[in-house]
Amino acid sequence: MRGGELVGSEMAARMSAFSRETNRIVALLVARTGQVRWVVVGDHHRVYLPDIGRHRASAEHFRGIRLVRTHLAGKPIGSDDLTDLTKLRLDLVASIEVLPDGRPGRLAWAHLLPANPENRLHEVLEAGPDRWRELDFARFIADVEEEFQRKAERTRTTGQVPGMLVYVRAPGERGAPERIEEARELARTAGIELVEAIVQTRPALHPRFGVGPGKFEDTLQRALQLGVEFLVFGQDLTPRQLKSITDASDLKVIDRTQLILDIFAQHATTRAGKLQVELAQYRYMLPRMAEKGTALSRLTGGIGGRGPGETKFEVHRRRVRDRILHLERELAGVSNQRSLRRGRRQEHGVPVASIVGYTNAGKSTLLNTLTRSSVLSDNRLFSTLDPTSRRLRFPHQGEIILTDTVGFLRDLPVDLVNAFKATLEEMEDAHLLLHVVDVSKDDFPERIDAVERIL
């Protein structure tokens, strides 16, 4: 077929004649150049498409493939067609009516819509044989993509990678707005701008998609409209959930722990900090390595995602286990070194005060103010990962050592807490724990409780 036409007259005639003769639907998957990539024959009512591979999500482009098929009975564009249109990011889906004598009749086609006030996801158009042959497909799809890009750019304000938050709220849950806002802050710190939040109330996360299947479909369609690249889940996902979601979508998927790990990886500067982050990453990765999803791509660097067969996976898993043991030994050495330093401080009789608190509560700012230091202080979560100590001298009362520590977070995963054991040990021998609280936050009592539970 010529690249600029939706479907040529000769091709439409041949498809219709074949369908009437065999009483089966025939479908073509056609590239924008006009090249037919796949030919698929279904039954009388529907056609099952082959696996056409994954496609990187982006705001500007669809897959560059359109589905053209015949229909013998029922609605020209059905729910299966619209599902394929969305999930596969097709340019459009076209359906040729097959007349009783085998000639092509009317043509119906559906294409996705960008964000709009009516929240319509797609549009279905229909025309007779004389009209649809005049359609300039190349111009049509270029206009649709341009409108998608223009609408998507309107939703962005920071220039960061666009994402969508998915949050499951328990019935009667208190503090959900604060938790959603915290997820936004985590995403912002990791470099993701959340342009919209999808919230569903459920007693528990759905075992496959987190949210219910219907809500998940709506989420994918909305994500396509907004041109987002990430689905950011406000809770942790199981390996099975992670695989189900990445199998059903070309979007990158990241859960709460991954988000925190990504931030830690960005902010770790010392050898000890990098070792702790790497250990936490590998502990998170290990149970998920057998799942061939793309959700780990931001953290794993491809480990466990390449190579044929289960044997290759087992080799990678063994290497990861060995690496975890090595990191644990390295961190044990770090812990011993810090213990020796703390012992020397005790011998000199200098009191130690550790500044603790929720992440981004102002701990580093307080340290800088009291000691006239220039420790990194930023309005971001987890800007401090490694403990920093400074002397605070008083005119007549001597001096103390102030130690700034990593910030805490509610529902912090156990593996993360364990990985940062060497850092948290700095608090064990402190003479005073100075708990910094940002009382401007509506949920500051819950934040106090979260810190005290971790301590």
Image (cartoon, rainbow, N blue to C red):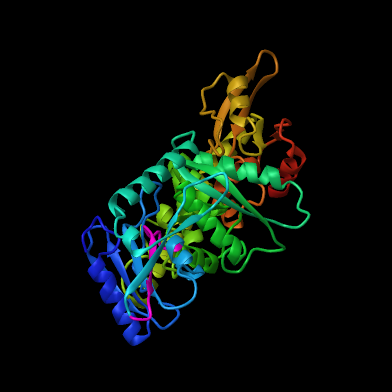
- Examine the image and state in which quarter residue 97 appears: bottom left
Per the image, is 129 magenta? no
- Examine the image and state in which quarter residue 132 appears: bottom left
Which residue range is magenta in the image? 87-101
Per the image, is 94 magenta? yes
Residue 148 vs 369, above or below: the answer is below
Left or right of 348 in this view: 453: right
Taking depth in this image into account, of 57 and 412 the one nearest to the observer is 57
Residue 300 vs 60, above or below: the answer is below
Left or right of 47 in this view: 212: right
Residue 218 vs 105, above or below: the answer is above
Q: What percent of the width, then of the height, locates residue 243?
A: 48, 67
Residue at left offset 59%, top offset 66%: 213
Of the 4 image quadrants, the one containing the N terminus is bottom left
Q: What percent of the width, then of the height, locates residue 13?
A: 27, 73
Residue 269 makes an appearance in the image: no
Instruction: Spot the residue most to the bottom.
Output: 22
